[in-house]
Image (spheres, rainbow, N blue to C red):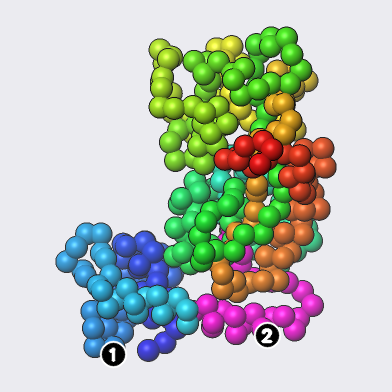
Amino acid sequence: MNLQQLEYIVALDAHRHFAKAAEQCFVTQPTLSMMIGKLEEEVGVKIFDRSRQPVVPTLAGTALIAQARVILREAERFKEIGLEQESSLKGDLRIGIIPTLSPYLLPLFLQSFMENYPEIRLRISERTTSVLIEDMHKGLLDAAILVTPLNDATLREDTLFYEAFVVYSGQDYHKEYLLPEDIDLSRLWLLEEGHCFRSQIMNICELRQQNHRSVEYEAGSLETLKQLADAQNGITILPELATGYLTASQLKKVKRFVAPEPVREVSLVTHRYLVKQRLVEALKSEILAHLPADKVREKSAGRVPIGQKAGK
C-alpha cells in the first residue's frame, strides 16, 4: 500500500470514471485500474463495484476512501510543515468561485497575486455553489469563494466582506430608494435554477414560482440579465461589485434599496482540516487588499443578511 494508490481511489471516487480519474492522476487507465486492483487484494475487500456505470464504491470501499482522504490530508500537511520553514510560498492552490462573483472579484486581485506570489500556481474553477461544495468534500478544491452561511459543519467560513444588492432598470421610479414591493415582478429577469443568487433575489422580492412573461429564458450569467434588462426595458438585480464595470449611462439605471439594504455575505470557505494554510492566507490577504471600499463593507452595519427581517 502506498500514497499513490490512495490518491487513485480518491480520484476514482471523485470522478466515478476510470479514464477521467487516470487523467487527473497523470497515468494510463490500465495502470490506474491495476494499482487499485492490487490495493483491493491487499486490504481483502472490493473498494469499487465495477459492474455498475458509473462505477461506485462498495460499502466497505466508502469507509476506506474516507480514511484515504484523511491520510492524504495528513501527508500533505507533513509536506506543508517542511515548506513553512522556507521564506517563499510555493505550490498549487485549487480554488473555486461562483459565477456571480468571478467576473467582478477576480480582476481586482488576480494580477497582483500572480506578481506577489509567482511560485503559487492558482487553479480556478467557476461553478455553482452546490457543485463547489461537492468538490470541496471530494478533496478537489483547497478553498472556495462563496456566499455564506452554508450550514455545513465540515466546512470553515472566513467572512471576507458584505455586498449590497442594487436594482438595475431603465424605469423611472420617481424616488431615490426602493422597497422590494416597488419591483414589477412581471419584468424581473432572474438567473436559472441552481444559482444561490437566484434564491436570494426571490427572498428579497418574496417571489414565488409564478410567471407573467411571454418569454421564458434561463440565464446563466448576470451580464446576460443586464443586457436583457437593457433591451426589454426590464429589471434585474445586481451585486454591488458589478456596478464597478458599468458605463456612465448604465450607472444611471442603478437604484439602491431603502436601508437597511439586503446584502450577501461573501466568505473564503475551506475544509475544516485545512492543509495549505499559508497559501490560503496569502489569497485572503490579496483579496482584502484590493476590495473597493465604496462597493463592499467589512461588517454588515445597518444592513441585514438575506433571510432576516429589518430590525431583527
Judge whether 87 appears above or below 112 on screen. below
Q: Nearer the viewer, residue 303 or 154?
A: 303
Packing grade of label 2 (10 A; few <14, some 14-19, many >=20) is: few
Residue 9 shows up from this direction? yes
Q: Position of residue 61 (x, y in %)?
A: 29, 76
Front in this rendered view, residue 211 or 219: 211
Crowd around label 1: few <14 · some 14–19 · many ≥20 (10 Å)? few
Boundaries of the magenta span: 72-95
Which residue position holds label 2?
82
Q: Quadrant of residue 94?
A: bottom right
At which x and y percent is residue 211? 41, 19
Q: Nearer the viewer, residue 118 or 270?
A: 270
Position of 245 relative to 176 (above/below) = below
The quadrant in which the C terminus is found is top right
Q: Residue at x 62, y 59 (%)?
A: 157
Q: Residue at x 57, y 40 (%)?
A: 307
Residue 164 visible (yes or no):
no
Name the image quarter holding the N terminus.
Answer: bottom left
> In this rendering, would 212 be left or right of 53?
right
Seen in the image, is 54 located left or right of residue 247?
A: left
Q: Earlier in the sequence, mark 2 or mark 1?
A: 1
Residue at the disc numbered 1 = 42
Residue 93: give x, y in percent of width and height. Answer: 61, 64
CB contact under 8 Å: marks 2 and 1:
no
Q: x, y (%) of residue 43?
A: 29, 88
Residue drawn at x 49%, y 15% is 186
Vertical order, 150 against 193 (above or below): below
In screen coordinates, is 199 left or right of 35? right
